[in-house]
Amino acid sequence: MKKVITLGIASVLSALVLVGCGAAISPEAHTGETHNKHMTQEKIHKIIKKAGENNGWKMTEFKSNAIIAEKIDGDDSTSVTVTFNKGSFDIAPANSDLEDAINSALK
């Protein structure tokens, strides 16, 4: 019986630690609209990739609906994931420079 109680307490504490850590590293994302819902996902993919590249971002294919964007300014580097569909895009963690570039390209 003592082993069962000890195991139960250990399980509860482990679950609390994992939940707490997961919440702490969850990046803030920002969602934008694609403005043009009649475009195909492939067209939106090309527009997002080109907008990032034109603004100094290295755009790396990740999935059919996601791109990894990286930018290095001197000793400072930034990396975000852009996911998208026909109606919207998400940037995680949020980056206003890339968001502005994508919004301008999608208009």
Image: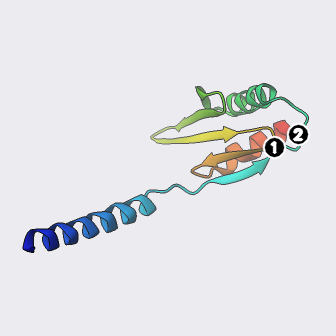
Q: Which mark is residue 71?
A: none
Amino acid type, callout 1: Gly
- Residue for point 77% across, 25% down: 42
* Picture coordinates of residue 9, whole percent (x, y): 21, 72
- Residue for point 32% across, 64% down: 15
Q: Earlier in the sequence, mark 1 or mark 2?
A: 2
Q: State how far apart marks 1 and 2 are (Cα).
A: 6 Å
Q: Is residue 69 left or right of residue 76?
A: right
Count of numbered tags? 2
Under circle 1, the secondary element is loop
- Residue for point 26% across, 63% down: 14
**Circles 1 and 2: CB atoms closer than 8 Å:** yes
Mark 2 crowdedness (10 Å alpha carbons): few <14, some 14-19, many ≥20: few
Q: Is residue 84 left or right of residue 21?
A: right
Residue 11 drawn above or below residue 1: above
- Residue for point 66% across, 33% down: 65
Q: Residue furthest left?
A: 2
* Observer-nearest of 104 and 32: 32
* Picture coordinates of residue 93, whole percent (x, y): 57, 51
Q: Is residue 102 left or right of residue 73?
A: right
Mark 2 — residue? 37
Under circle 2, the secondary element is loop
Residue 106 figure quarter: top right
Mark 1 crowdedness (10 Å alpha carbons): few <14, some 14-19, many ≥20: some
Where's the N terminus, which quadrant?
A: bottom left
* Observer-nearest of 84 and 1: 1
Where's the C terminus, which quadrant?
A: top right
Residue 79 drawn above or below residue 9: above
Q: Which mark is residue 87?
A: 1
Amino acid type, callout 2: Lys
